[in-house]
Image (cartoon, rainbow, N blue to C red):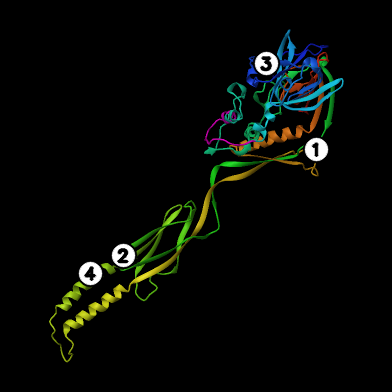
Amino acid sequence: MDYRWEPVPLDSFRSVKVLLHKTASIGEVRRGEAVDPVDLSPMMSQGKQSCFDVNITLNWNYELFGAENQPAPNHVLEIQLMQAGLFVTLWIGIVESVSSFTISRGERSMQLTAKSRDSLDIFRTAKRVTALFPQLTDMAYIAGKIAKSAGLDDDEIVLPISGMTTSHTNTQLADMSAWDMLTNLFLPLSWTPFMDGQGRLKAASRDVQGAIADVVLEPERVVKVVAQRQRPPATRLKVKWLDPTLKKSLQQGRKLADQTMTTGWFLPFLKKTIYFSDDKTQRAVNTYMVTKQSANALFVPVCLERYEQLEQNKGKITLINLAWGPAIITLLVQWQAAHSTPDGVSGPNTVPVGRKLEGYAQLAFMLIMMSIGTGIYEIWGTPYEWVHARNTTEAFDSSAPRWVDNPVEVETDFIINEQHAQAVAVRELIYQAKSANKWAVSLVDDPRIEFGDILEFPDESKMYVEDVSRSIMRGDPAVMEIKGFLI
């Protein structure tokens, strides 16, 4: 509700001003600092204002001759109503278009359309990316940051305390318009974003079950009521939400990496760190090594082959030399000793003893020099990821006939847990089901009423306000039209 206003007395007539501001900003107009108003009221032949737009038709003589005097897109349009002898700002918007511009003999006219500021491209079209918000960041704080990025000032953000914070480690909204971000952010809070008549961001509650009326209508203020059902009510509602708790998701076992290694007598050992993916991010469990070709494939054993997993994303292959290095040193010593042995003979053999010993040492040495091998190894295991599960929570109308099924799906990443998801699903199902029962009501004007208010009629039935419209022609009866649904 807009508490600046009082209900208009019965049998009143409209006293209104329509002002065009060519240079002032919305903030300056709202604060009463604009010094450039042009009163279009005397030139108006038709005019209607709603929560979201204003449409007027101007008929003029010479007042708007010249491009500098005519309304143009992006000018600020202000609607003022009289209260207690003073004109008070009721609605502020941006001129979107000037159409049906006609100049002929005896006729000069144009139609002017202005929209609330949330209809601008900066809110509805331009894609945005927010900063990263840490865990336990207040939802209303994030909404304020989004609104500021779309051009709103601090005093143009009027949001209630959310009482809810982000549950994910990091939260970021990307590739969405500012209005889509706000709508997505407000869903788990059971809010609907809207711009009030002064161009400020506000939130209307979607929790209609047991809602307390903002305005209780007296019988004499109700002029006319028209009801109609425009679509079948929702019977089921599914909320798809991102679980903030990380869960391990195991994949099918497969080959994670392969490695070729060459070693021999010249290395005491060879170690190689193996990552389970090229980008070094893949995690795996139960990893093991498959030997496609052993480094000991020749008839001479070369090494011991070992594998161990070091961390979640890597392991290590180790080839350990079979002590050939110390054996070479020993053989060299023996070779030198055999070379120094006297060339005596033993028995009938005429080969010198020293030459025999030298030949044995040379044979052993050559065998050691041949101990070089190349191994081909594969690492297999079960890869896994830590993921946020995509959950679905459903609420349904148990009183709906079995042959009637009208499901609705909503999606949000700001649900805290299953209990929160259930509460959101129930609240949203009630809102969706109730909103099918549309009402249109004519009342004696009450400028307090705005989007999201709850009206109570004399029979104690209640209505959720979705739009408010009124004629802004001077002298017209002070009557307003309200559209919404019965709750």
The residue type indicated by label 2 comes to Leu
Q: Which residue is mark 4?
A: 329
Label 2: how many Cα within 10 Å (few below 14, some 14–19, many 20+):
some
The residue type indicated by label 1 comes to Pro
| Residue at the top extreme of this rendering | 85
Q: Residue at x 28, y 69 (%)?
A: 324
Q: Is residue 318 left or right of residue 202?
A: left
Q: Nearer the viewer, residue 466 or 154?
A: 154
**Lower position in the chain sequence, tag 3 or tag 1:** 3
Q: Is residue 136 magenta?
A: yes
Q: Nearer the viewer, mark 1 or mark 4?
A: 4
SS label for mark 4: helix
> Residue 247: x percent and y percent?
54, 47
SS label for mark 2: loop
Distance, label 3 to label 1, CA atoms, is: 50 Å
* Residues drawn in magenta: 126-144
The residue type indicated by label 4 comes to Ile
Distance, label 2 to label 4, CA atoms, is: 14 Å
